[in-house]
Image (cartoon, helix red, strand yellow):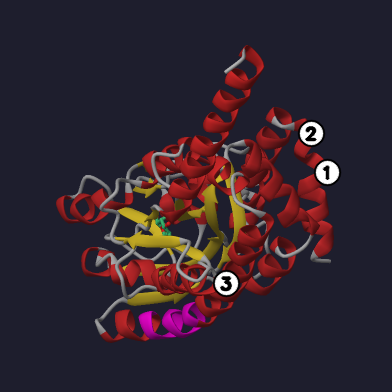
């Protein structure tokens, strides 16, 4: 064998090995992180996505969902999916804001006037800009799930005005914007993993937290904190996303399969969400929770000006995105 042939043979062998490796990598089961129990709308959506990619690829793509946060808490799992230690997940845009500034725009309190407006914005150009920011952070966004609106709940008393937060300590998700948000309302905030909140409410380490009805219900927080005040200060989408390098290694056909499966799973999740939001509300009310509507949210909204100002000061290049989201809802 001459030198040229040797090199060619070696190169071909290396190419064959890398093809085998890629094929092997695709046949491997993708591990999906989920913080929620199996009977939650996010879980239903993820199961549907996994089922569809398997079906549409004739068994070549396989994905499994690990429910209940057994693969770690959310900030850690975000790093894992970015780095490829985990393959896919559904993440809340709140903690995602810490890794992609574009995603943080939706964590500006009251930026969406309602859930429908959030979906419209996320399914349009602003959503694409956010997806591009996530891609730079190593996450391929395939679709936006619903997680309704978040409101404050606590163990002490109903919240009707920002003054009612005074002296109370609230758990927030891992994102500095939320610490600023609670401080601007006059309360104290402490970031804490979701899985520690129940015990912390029970033992009085914190006085309250904030979430949507389905999470308030499924986490059992309603058993520990019975005042739920409908402030709806955050309307956060969730992202069905895949490790970017894994996605980039797929063929065009496989990418198409993923996108179609994601689109279908988004529909399933959003429908399951609407149903569960009603059910959870009924359940917590029947359990004796005291729900108060906050008819006039303007005092809460006005108090957010410094949070917006700080954000724009720190991210001047995102001022246009904030404005585009606001203008799209006029
Ligand atoms: C839920 C959300 C989770 C997690 C949780 C929390 O509504 O679906 O991803 O972010 O809130 O408060 O940590």
Q: Residue at x 82, y 53 (%)?
A: 324
**Which quadrant of the structure image shows residue 320?**
top right
Reply above or below: 9 against 41. Answer: above
Checking the image for residue 320, the label placed there is 1
Q: Residue at x 17, y 56 (%)?
A: 202
Instruction: Tell me, yes or no, whether the highlighted magenta stretch contains residue 274.
Output: yes
In the rendered structure, the answer to whether residue 296 lies left or right of residue 61 reads right
* C-alpha separation, residue under disc 1 versus residue under disc 3: 28 Å
Residue 153 seen from this side: no
Q: Quadrant of the N terminus?
A: top right
The reply to whether dot 1 and dot 2 touch (C-beta < 8 Å) is: yes
Region rendered in magenta: 272-280
The residue carrying mark 3 is 266
Residue 283 position in % (x across, y down): 31, 84
The residue carrying mark 2 is 317
Q: Residue at x 47, y 81 (%)?
A: 272
* C-alpha separation, residue under disc 3 versus residue under disc 2: 30 Å
Mark 2: secondary structure: helix
Sequence-wise first label, 3 or 2: 3
């Amino acid at each position: 064998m001459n030198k040229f042939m040797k090199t060619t043979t070696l190169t071909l062998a290396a190419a064959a090995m890398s093809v085998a490796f890629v094929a092997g990598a695709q046949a491997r089961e993708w591990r999906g992180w989920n913080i929620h129990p199996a009977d939650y709308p996010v879980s239903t959506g993820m199961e549907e996505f996994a089922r569809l990619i398997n079906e549409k690829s004739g068994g070549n793509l396989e994905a499994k969902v690990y429910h209940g946060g057994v693969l770690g808490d959310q900030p850690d799992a975000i790093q894992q999916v970015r780095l490829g230690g985990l393959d896919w997940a559904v993440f809340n845009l709140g903690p995602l804001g810490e890794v992609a500034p574009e995603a943080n725009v939706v964590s500006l309190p009251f930026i969406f006037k309602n859930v429908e407006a959030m979906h419209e914005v996320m399914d349009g150009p602003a959503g694409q800009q956010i997806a591009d920011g996530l891609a730079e952070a190593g996450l391929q966004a395939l679709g936006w799930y619903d997680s309704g609106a978040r409101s404050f709940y606590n163990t002490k008393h109903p919240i009707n005005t920002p003054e009612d937060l005074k002296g109370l300590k609230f758990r927030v998700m891992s994102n500095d914007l939320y610490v600023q948000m609670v401080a601007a309302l006059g309360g104290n905030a402490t970031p804490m993993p979701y899985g520690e909140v129940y015990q912390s409410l029970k033992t009085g380490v914190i006085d309250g937290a904030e979430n949507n009805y389905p999470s308030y219900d499924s986490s059992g927080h309603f058993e520990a904190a019975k005042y739920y005040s409908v402030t709806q200060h955050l309307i956060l989408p969730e992202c069905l996303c895949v490790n970017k390098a894994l996605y980039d290694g797929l063929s065009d056909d496989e990418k198409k399969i993923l996108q179609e499966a994601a689109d279908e799973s988004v529909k399933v999740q959003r429908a399951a969400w609407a149903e569960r939001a009603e059910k959870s509300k009924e359940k917590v009310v029947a359990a004796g929770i005291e729900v108060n509507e906050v008819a006039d949210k303007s005092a809460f909204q006005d108090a957010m000006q410094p949070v917006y100002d700080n954000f724009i000061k720190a991210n001047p290049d995102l001022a246009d995105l904030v404005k585009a989201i606001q203008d799209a809802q006029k």
